[in-house]
Each structure stands twice: as C-alpha cells, then as structure tokens.
Amino acid sequence: MESNRDVHHVVVVGAGFGGLEAARKLGKAKERVKVTVVDRYNHHLFQPLLYQVATAVLSPADISAPIRHILRGKNTQVLLAEARSVDTARKVLVCDGGELAYDSLVLATGATHSYFNHPEWSKIAPGLKTLNDAVAMRERILLALEAAERETDPERQREWLTFVIIGAGPTGVELAGALSYMTRHSLPKDFRRIDTRKARVILLEGLPRVLSQFSEKLSEDARRDLEKLGVEVRTGSMVSGVDEQGVSIGEERIPTRTVLWGAGVAASPLMRSLGAPLDKAGRVKVDASLTLSGHPDVYVIGDVASLQQDGKPVPGIAPAAMQMGRHVAKSILERLAGKPPEPFHYVDKGSFAVIGRGYAVGTMFGKVPLSGFLAWALWAGVHIAYLVGFRNRLAVMLNWFFTFMTRGRDVRLITGAYAPRLPPFSPTAEPPGDGIHAGPDPAHSAPPPIH
C-alpha cells in the first residue's frame, strides 16, 4: 500500500458519470478504502437530457438526483465544495473551504463552455451544461414568445420570433429540433396575437456539415430531417459577432433577440493547476492508464481527459466517462494489491443524436449506422437505462409518452431566472396584419410530417 495510513483515502472530484461510477465501485471495498466525493452541486445530473428541460419537456428533477442519496450506505463521504487547485507535491486538493489530503485523486470535473476567445458572448448566448443553464435557457425561449405577443411593431416581433443556435453538434441539433417542434406543434393554440409556427429556428455551423462526428450519410439524414421540422440549417457559416440585437456572419446580419450556444467546450479550469500538458480544449493529456504523467496517484477521466486510442481521441460522452470511472476504481484497488496498472480500452457501444419526435441518427458499436424510428427507440432505451433512480426513469417515460401522444409541453414555467426588458403592450391592439395571428389558420399549410 502506498500510504502510511491503514485506510487508503480516495478523493473523487466531480459526481458526473465518470466520478459517480468510480465512487460506487470504490465504495464497496470498505475494509481498505475511504472515499470522499467533492462537488460544487449536491446532485448528479443527466446532462444528455438538459435540452429537454430547456424546451419544456422535462422538469429539472426528472434528470437529477441527490449525490448523498445515490451513495448512501457506502463507505463514502460527500462534501459540497468547489475544488480550486491541486498540489501534487503535498498530495492535497485545495477547495473553497479548506484543504483535503488524498492518497489517490480522481479528477472528473467535466467541461464548460468555450466561446473561442469571445467571453463577452457568454452573457448573450448561454450554453447548456447545468440545470441553471437549462432553466435560464427555457426562460429565454418562453419570454421571447411573450415579448413577441406584446410587440406591436412587426419587424421587432420577427426578431423575438427568431431563434439562432450556434453549433451543430449533438447539443445544437437536438436543441434546434426540439425548439422547432415546440413552436410548430405545441404552442400555436396558446397565443392570440402571434402564430408560433412562423418562428424561425436557425442552426449555424462553421464546419461543412452537421454532426460531423458521424458519417456523411447520417449527417445528411440529420440535416434533411431538421429541415423537414422547419429548422433553417446553415453550414460553413462562421459567426463573427454576437450582440443583443443579432448575430453576424461576416457581412451578413441576422436580427434576433435569442441566441443559444451549442458549439465549443473547454475543460474545467482546475486542470491548469496540475502543471501538466494540455490539449487545445484544456484537457489533460493522460497516459494509457488514465494517470497524470509522473503522478500515478492522480487519475483524470471524462471530459477533462485527452487520450488517443487507435489513432482517434476517446470521445467526451457519458459511456466513455463511465467506462473510465470503472477502470480507475479497478486500477486503484489493483495497485493496493500490488498489481501493475492495466491500460484503459474504450469500447464504443454506440452514440446517437435525436432530431425530432420518433427520429434520430447514430451508430451501434461504432460501425453500424442507424437512423429513423429504430435509432430513436434505441436512444430512448439507453437514456432511460442510464438515468439514476426508479423515480426518474418512471417520470421521464411518462413525460415522453405524454409528449409523444399529445405533442404537449407542460413544463413551461417562468420563474425569474432571466428577466429581459419586455416591450410595452396594448391590450386593445388588433393582431398584426402580416399573417401573424391567433390560433391555427385553416388556410395555413400544414407543417411537414415527422418521421
């Protein structure tokens, strides 16, 4: 044992997918290991479904669970704190409330938003990484519709009804599809002065195609179905400016009051305190056993780890983080038993991106392409299986069934997390004469079918 203490103290920073898996496995070795989980939030979050909170399908409680409840009954302490830095020489984690000594350290802090050297855009174009982000984004969307309902000037009304999403990775694609579906199918009967079906949802991507991590065929399938949903997909469009009145793409200007961010990500700033080599996104370059070079007692996993396997980077997705968490827990226990560490090997079981109601694209085992309803059903099944807790699984299944059958969006709450200046209203004003009106119009062409 590489410690003077009889019990090996493992500190796990971050209770996301990777950190939680590591803590669960280590918590079973009660006679030899003590685990402390450090997180600045008291809940584990199922991040892949944040966009459904942002688009009023799910409640925040449906995709989160208290960390203490998940790890109850195990030899694990949960500490609500924010990690500030790591002192590898003294083997100490420095937090906002003090220092925590460790024998082994597992860093699983996850990623944050990257605005490509434009931090000023963050206040205008919020990203989607936490529950607070999702609730604030939902309120931006709903308040934009409320503002459009109050607006008497047709031009400004169109600005409120234009939603621009920057970045066509899985987050941007899923957000665009859900938002377009909501405005075209869930909300038209709820407003009197606007026709939400005329809302513009514009998806901007700097690369030549959407979902570039998938094959060209799946990428084209995704683009086609986004356009069927009414999303305006624009690839090869590099954003040059973002402000409260719109988005600039070179010389072109898109007037909008609502910009949402689904583009780059960056590793947690905590990684910079390690003094280790980092990649362009701030991820730590780890060795094959997921340890920090020169520090076999420091493990880095999930979105903050940069590792090449078979000439390709291990993706920053939940299944990879979970596999890393289990591997690290096994490695620590084997090291205590005097066994050499084994290299980590990621098994690609598949990844998916949902486009709309009953439609998704993805791959199984990294090779088998899937699209359509089968891909959507597999996506739904995997997400249900990965959710923590029976209550959450049941709640999400019931919400999805209700939404699928009725096309409703019942979690449309505005609580004050975001408060823009709404335009003045005129209760006696007639609906604008530019085709924006109350309720469904029999003469209005039906939206395209959803497959």
Image: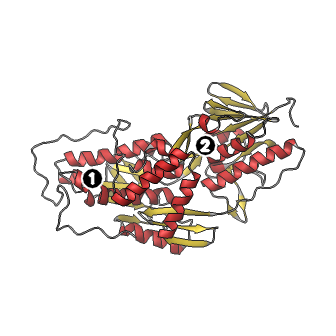
Q: Is residue 75 left or right of residue 334?
A: left
Q: Which mark is residue 159?
A: 1
Quadrant of residue 137 within the rendered picture: top left
Q: Residue at x 46, y 42 (%)?
A: 60
Q: Is residue 32 visible to the viewer in this orientation of the structure?
A: yes
Q: Which mark is residue 368?
A: none
Residue 77 x, y percent position in the rendering = 68, 31
Q: Residue at x 12, y 42 (%)?
A: 427
Location of the N terminus by quadrant is top right
Q: Residue at x 69, y 38 (%)?
A: 12
Picture colour scheme: secondary structure
How many numbered marks are there?
A: 2
Q: Could you classify mark 1 by the number of other residues whose Cα lies within 10 Å: few (under 14), some (14-19), or many (20 or more)? A: many
Q: Element at badge 2?
A: loop
Q: Type of residue at label 1?
A: Glu
Q: Type of residue at label 2?
A: Ser
Tell me if residue 97 comes above or below residue 399 in the rendering.
above
Residue 439 x, y percent position in the rendering = 19, 56
Residue 421 x, y percent position in the rendering = 27, 38
Instruction: State the residue in front, 84 or 227.
Output: 227
Q: Could you classify mark 2 by the number of other residues whose Cα lies within 10 Å: few (under 14), some (14-19), or many (20 or more)? A: some
Quadrant of residue 75 within the rendered picture: top right
Tell which residue pokes out farthest to the top in this image: 98
Q: Element at badge 1?
A: helix
Location of the C terminus by quadrant is bottom left
Q: Is residue 292 visible to the viewer in this orientation of the structure?
A: no
Q: Residue at x 27, y 49 (%)?
A: 145
Q: Which residue is mark 2?
A: 268
Mark closest to the chain's N terminus, 2 or 1: 1
Tell which residue pokes out farthest to the bottom in this image: 217
Cα separation between marks 2 and 1? 34 Å
